[in-house]
Amino acid sequence: MSWIWMIVAFVAGGVIAALVVAAMNKATQAKRREEMQREMERETDVMKKNKMLEVKEKFIQLKAELEKQVAARNSKIQSVETKLKQHELSLSQRQEELQRKLTEADILKENLNNQAQLIEKRKLDLEKMHQQEVVHLETISGLSAGEAKERLIESLKDEAKTDAASYINEIMEEAKMTANMEAKKVVIKTIQRVATETAIENSVTVFHIDSDEIKGRIIGREGRNIRALEAATGIEIIVDDTPEAIVLSGFDPVRREVARLALHQLVLDGRIHPARIEEVVNKVRKQVEEEIIETGKRTTIDLGIHGLHPELVRLIGKMKYRSSYGQNLLQHARETANLCAVMAAELGLNPKKARRAGLLHDIGKVPDDEPELPHAILGMKICEKYKEKPDICNAIGAHHDEVEMQTLLAPIVQVCDAISGARPGARREVVEAYIKRLNDLEQLAMSYPGVVKTYAIQAGRELRVIVGADKICVMDAGQIVDSGTHEELLDRCERYQSLWKVSCSSSAWHVSTRRGEENHD
């Protein structure tokens, strides 16, 4: 029994101890909570103070910014008010000045009215005095005013006619003296204002190669490649001992250019055989045709010519590959066009039409079919076909006098064509060749008997010959059989003796006939 009480006591003591420990824990926790609460209250107070300080600082900052803005606005308002006051002041000054000017204008108007009245009064007085003087003069002269006026007009008419006639004669004489000089000035100014470029063309193109080994590849086995190339291009290809060069010979410069470009591509590619040659030639021919069209378009754009038919543009581009007397045809046409425009402007004509006619004047030299017609007539027909204006067509056809000139445009084109083609050195290959050609012409003329001196002019297009006046050439069947003086030929030449006898008998017959007519009269 006792052990039961001991257990109960032990349990009761444990319970009591647990209760005591629990009470002590609760007290400790309550104390901790009070301390934490106090700590939180302190932190809260600190945060409140910090926030209040931040709010105060922000308020002070915003207040300062607002004060600055207010001050700036006040300054702006003050400046605007100042400007308004100045403007009002200037307006008031202008108003006062305007009022003063109006007052002065009224005074001036009144003075002018008074002066006008005075002038009108004096005018009436002068008219009265003039009438009195006219009456007095009529009384003295015995003529009325109308009769005196008619006599004065007649005398003035006669004097004016005399002066006009003399003045007209002076103008005519001055015009005769200065017309030739003025024409030369126009031509000289035209030539000076045009920059000329001379291109050199011939019938042979030299194709340069890096080594002579390529010549064998171009010739091919048994000459197949070179025959295929000649057949495809229509150009004679000369492969000789000339180092590092192949000669392309042909009169068609377009074909020569096609052959040159085709050879260039074939040599670069390295594949040279008949099939490849035909393919490359066809390709290059298309490229050259495109280049011709592009050249024509570029030329028309450079000269400011618009509205040309596409076929005419192609023919203009084809001029690049054509030459005349060593002068590139396209450069000649451009030069002639610019000359025509300048000369037309100097003469007061339409420079655009003149430039168009100058560019197209040699279009008949580059047709595709090349009929047997003069190039001027052919060019005129081509331009008529492609709807060019009649005055331009006439200028093209008349620039070599094949047709009659109908407008002032025609002689301008003719003159400018002559200026471009006849200037020394325009149509030449080199200066030495040009000089040699002139010397050969002169020597050829000097080879004829009786010729004393020769002069080649107009770039070799004209030859002036001076013959000996004391020498006579005897011809028989179109051939010169003898030459010399009259006495020498009478001594040695039977043909001349017979001709002289016939001439003397004919002269004697004419003399006797004339004497018979005089006696009859």
Image (cartoon, rainbow, N blue to C red):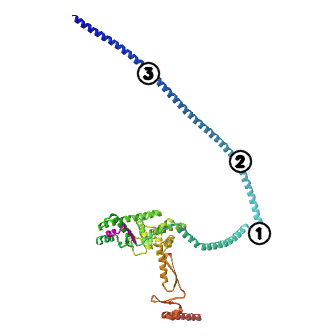
Which residue position is annotated with label 3? Answer: 44
Residue 519: percent from left, percent from top: 59, 95
Q: Is residue 313 left or right of 222 when viewed as pictured?
A: right
Q: Which residue is at the front of the view, 365 or 494?
A: 494
Q: Amino acid at mark 1?
A: Ser
Helix, strand or loop at label 1? It is helix
Residue 375: percent from left, percent from top: 43, 73
Name the residue furthest left.
Answer: 1
Question: Residue 172, relative to residue 470: is it above or below?
Answer: above
Magenta highlight range? 204-218
Helix, strand or loop at label 3? It is helix
Q: Is residue 22 located in the magenta-colored stretch of the structure?
A: no
Alpha carbons under labels 1 and 2: distance apart: 50 Å
Residue 141's tag is: 1
Residue 107's tag is: 2
Q: Is residue 212 located in the magenta-colored stretch of the structure?
A: yes
